[in-house]
């Protein structure tokens, strides 16, 4: 056997083995199963893991941008006209949120943690100085007192109204951004505090929230089931709430939004428990996106999350008392927040009933600026970009006994909205890209084997064809005709002896005499 034939046979054998093994691995999905099993095992909150450290001290910087609706025509609104507002901001704060008091429970299957949040002002990302800039907005303590007086007699309400007027306060107030956010001593609350010491005399949207946490959480670590990774087991010792009017609405579902299980697919719904909204919400897949070279799935709350119970009966449980429902796009949360009739929505009433948008001049909802979304890397489940946007509103309506409300039209009045943003930092993005490259190479290793087998198959075909061509050439040269002329009788002179042949160059030998 020639060297060329040996090479062909060797190439054919290797090619066949590669194709058989590669196709078998692709069909059996051995490497994909191995990678998925490894991810499910590693993406757990175990004490010494990289995932645990990232969960304990999230590396991406989180920023809180506060926007306020400055009221430009308070007198016209009190006379029965439409309110007009102008958005000012943002006033940006860096949010630090390390987890503390971490304790593993039940053989590492659950973990207890507190999540205190600290805010530091970032002037270079802000529109102005919060200690200097002034805003005019609804006097929330005033509205809260009116709301509490609804159950009292007309005479009591009238007396309270006269007393508050004597303090020089009304339905609107003017304060600095810093006071309105972080607190000031309110004259109404100070008087109430003197009679009821348990009532705080300070008011601020973020009063006592700098350096504090939203409750005690117990999370699943994912040791028993990777799908439970990061899910909330209890909040403040509760597995369900009691504020709402249905069991479904009172459920505490999902994670706190910081982590999700690995191997996310586009068809599933992701649940988040939002303590500031007093409820769980779900997010659905929107589109594929790319963040710093990392492919991700964007998930966002669909329109049915805050849809009217008439259009989405599942939301009936958020009507408290039962049957007392608002329209699409708003949620009354005063049931879990004592005091004023607080309503939450998306900024500028995005995805809300047009009647709420048209009730106030100066609102312009749009998806780009007002949508809440999460961009998740589907293999690891890690959020690589997030925008949580929520608006705080208050119900303004006529209350008998309070003359200042005599002419106003009932309005869900926008106060402010917050844009909480986080994007993966460059170092973490680089590590993520490296990890995903390794995962991709290992997962696609069987395809690489098949590809190499196909290449060798092409090489085998080329070698075989060239070998065939050379054999044909040899056969042609071995039987080539020397002359194409037909045989003719030779015209030899009579005096010249006959030669032994026409084609043999040899002279005949004369016979020797005896």
Image (tube, helix red, strand yellow):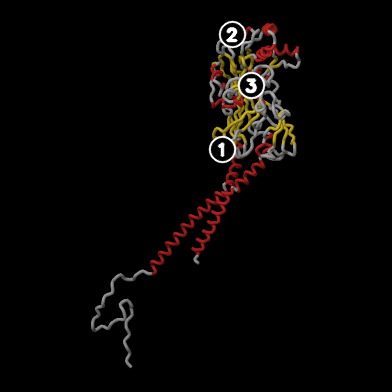
- The residue carrying mark 2 is 407
Under circle 2, the secondary element is: loop
- The residue carrying mark 3 is 319
Q: Marks 3 and 1: CB-CB under 8 Å? A: no
Q: Nearer the viewer, residue 22 or 140?
A: 22
Q: Nearer the viewer, residue 300 or 311?
A: 311
Where does residue 335 sit, x and y in percent of width and height?
67, 20
Where does residue 9 sit, x and y in percent of width and height?
51, 61
Q: Is residue 215 left or right of residue 472?
A: right
Seen at 49% across and 63% down, the residue is: 5
Seen at 49% across and 66% down, the residue is: 2
Q: Which mark is residue 295?
A: 1
In this rendering, is residue 45 above or below 82? below
Where does residue 60 sit, x and y in percent of width and height?
63, 33
Comparing labels 1 and 2, the label whose residue is closer to the camera: 2
* Cα–Cα gap, marks 3 and 2: 27 Å
The numbered mark, 3 or 1, whose residue comes first in the sequence reads 1
Comparing labels 3 and 1, the label whose residue is closer to the camera: 3
Q: Is residue 156 visible?
A: yes
Seen at 62% across and 37% down, the residue is: 381
* Cα–Cα gap, marks 3 and 1: 39 Å
The numbered mark, 1 or 2, whose residue comes first in the sequence reads 1
Under circle 1, the secondary element is: strand
The numbered mark, 3 or 2, whose residue comes first in the sequence reads 3
Q: Nearer the viewer, residue 259 or 319?
A: 319
The quadrant in which the C terminus is found is bottom left
Label 3: few (<14), some (14–19) or many (≥20) C-alpha neighbours in 10 Å: many
Report which quarter residue 342 is drawn in: top right
Report which quarter residue 270 is drawn in: top right
Under circle 3, the secondary element is: loop
**Which residue in the rendered view is the most extreme toward the left?**
494
């Amino acid at each position: 056997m020639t060297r060329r034939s040996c090479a062909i046979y060797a190439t054919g054998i290797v090619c066949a083995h590669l194709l058989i093994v590669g196709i078998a691995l692709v069909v059996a999905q051995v490497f994909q199963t191995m990678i998925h099993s490894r991810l499910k095992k590693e993406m757990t909150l175990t004490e010494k893991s990289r995932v645990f450290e990232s969960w304990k001290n999230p590396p991406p910087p989180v920023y809180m941008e506060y926007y306020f609706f400055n009221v430009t025509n308070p007198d016209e609104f009190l006379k029965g006209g439409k309110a007009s507002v102008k958005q000012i901001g943002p006033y940006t704060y860096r949010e630090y949120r390390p987890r503390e008091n971490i304790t593993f429970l039940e053989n590492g299957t659950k973990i207890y943690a507190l999540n205190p949040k600290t805010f530091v002002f970032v002037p270079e990302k802000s529109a102005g100085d919060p200690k200097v800039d002034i805003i005019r907005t609804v006097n929330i303590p005033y509205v809260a007192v009116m709301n509490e007086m609804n159950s009292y007699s007309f005479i009591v309400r009238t007396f309270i109204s006269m007393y508050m007027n004597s303090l020089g306060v009304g339905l609107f107030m003017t304060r600095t951004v810093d006071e309105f956010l972080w607190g000031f001593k309110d004259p109404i609350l100070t008087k109430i505090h003197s009679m009821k010491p348990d009532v705080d005399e300070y008011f601020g949207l973020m009063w006592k929230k700098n350096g504090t946490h939203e409750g005690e959480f117990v999370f699943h670590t994912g040791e028993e089931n990777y799908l439970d990774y990061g899910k909330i087991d209890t909040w403040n010792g509760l597995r369900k709430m009691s504020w709402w009017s249905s069991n479904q609405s009172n459920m505490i579902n999902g994670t706190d939004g910081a982590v999700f299980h690995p191997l996310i697919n586009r068809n599933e719904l992701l649940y988040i428990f939002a303590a500031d909204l007093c409820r769980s919400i779900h997010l659905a897949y929107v589109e594929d996106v790319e963040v710093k070279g990392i492919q991700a799935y964007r998930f966002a709350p669909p329109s049915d999350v805050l849809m009217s119970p008439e259009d989405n009966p599942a939301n009936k449980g958020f009507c408290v008392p039962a049957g007392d429902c608002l329209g699409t796009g708003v949620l009354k949360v005063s049931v879990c927040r004592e005091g004023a009739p607080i309503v939450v929505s998306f900024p500028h009433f995005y995805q809300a009933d047009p009647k709420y948008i048209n009730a106030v001049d100066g609102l312009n909802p749009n998806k780009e600026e007002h949508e809440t979304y999460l961009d998740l890397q589907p293999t690891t489940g890690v959020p690589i970009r997030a925008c949580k946007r929520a608006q705080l509103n208050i119900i303004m309506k006529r209350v008998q006994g309070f003359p200042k409300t005599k002419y106003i039209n009932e309005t869900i009045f926008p106060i402010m909205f917050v844009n909480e943003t986080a994007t993966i930092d460059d170092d973490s993005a680089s590590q993520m890209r490296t990890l995903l490259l390794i995962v991709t190479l290992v997962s696609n290793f069987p395809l690489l084997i098949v590809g190499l087998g196909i290449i060798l198959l092409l090489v085998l075909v080329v070698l075989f064809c060239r070998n065939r061509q050379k054999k044909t050439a040899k056969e042609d040269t071995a039987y080539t005709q020397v002359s194409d002329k037909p045989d003719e009788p030779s015209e030899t002179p009579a005096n010249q002896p006959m030669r032994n042949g026409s084609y043999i160059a040899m002279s005949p030998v004369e016979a020797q005499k005896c």
